[in-house]
Image (spheres, rainbow, N blue to C red):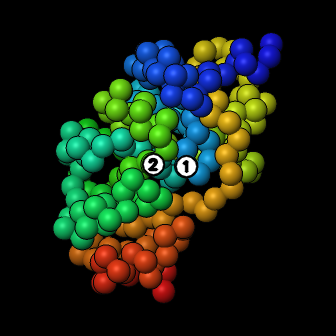
Amino acid sequence: MTLASLTIPFWSPAEIDGALRGIIDHLSNRGVLAYPTETVYGFGTAVDQESVESLVRLKGRPPAKPFLLLIGDPAQLARLDLHLPTYAAHLAARFWPGPLTLVLEGGDGRVPARLRGPEGGVAVRFTPHPGLRRLLAAYGEPITSTSANRPGVPPAMSSVEIVEQWPDAIHRGILHVLDGGRLSPSRPSTVVDCTGRRPRVIRPGVLSAAVLRECVPDLVGDT
């Protein structure tokens, strides 16, 4: 089989729109999706227990490492009952969509435990990737996200790498791969814990603490 027969073109607006129905059906059937983001290729599913467990099995993810959520509209946070404290709302207004991941409280009874980090929050990013934003708008719900790679292997920067690492899951129909071309290397998103009284950087990334403090001066961490 050729690469084209194992992946779904996801580059031009026409390709993206033409693929949406099949992608949404796959997510609704608890399938796993590989997709390009603004940083690396990711794996994702619908936000329900069965779908998340499908991703856990495919990825071989240890229990202590949660997944994050990608949203295409901040209004999707309310549907999952995730809470933006005032300082987090300021950060979101300034840097979303963009390379900023916010760890939020809430989601009780709506967000599977596998999506919660050690602090009990749920990590969320409003992606600026145009194809993903179109998909998320059409789907109407967030999707989970984790890097598309096997343990010890760098995150995939192209659909070819995913096909090479996960051929069995693709052939069995568990994994659908969106081909958005080869991505350019970039730094990961900055992760800010918004579950406490003050925002706290828990993973440095493309947005520096100095830039974030222009918006929230009492930010803790990342010097």
Report which residue position mark 2 lands on: 128
Q: Quadrant of residue 144?
A: top left
Query: Under tag 1, what secondary structure?
Result: loop
As rendered, which of 94 and 55 lies closer to the eye?
94
Residue 161 relative to residue 188: left or right = right
Q: Visible in this render: residue 30?
A: no
Report which residue position mark 1 lands on: 38
User: Does residue 219 lie above or below 12 as drawn?
Assistant: below
Q: Do callouts 1 and 2 mark residues in contact (Cβ within 8 Å)?
A: yes
Residue pictured at 31% horizontal, 76% vertical: 215
Q: Residue 141: x percent and y percent?
A: 32, 33
- Disc 1 marks which amino acid? Glu
- Disc 2 marks which amino acid? Pro
User: Does residue 125 lie above or below 2 as drawn?
Assistant: below
User: Does residue 20 lie above or below 142 as drawn?
Assistant: above
Q: Visible in this render: residue 182?
A: yes
Q: Callout 1: 10 Å neighbours few (<14), some, many (20+)?
A: many
Residue pictured at 73% horizontal, 51% vertical: 154
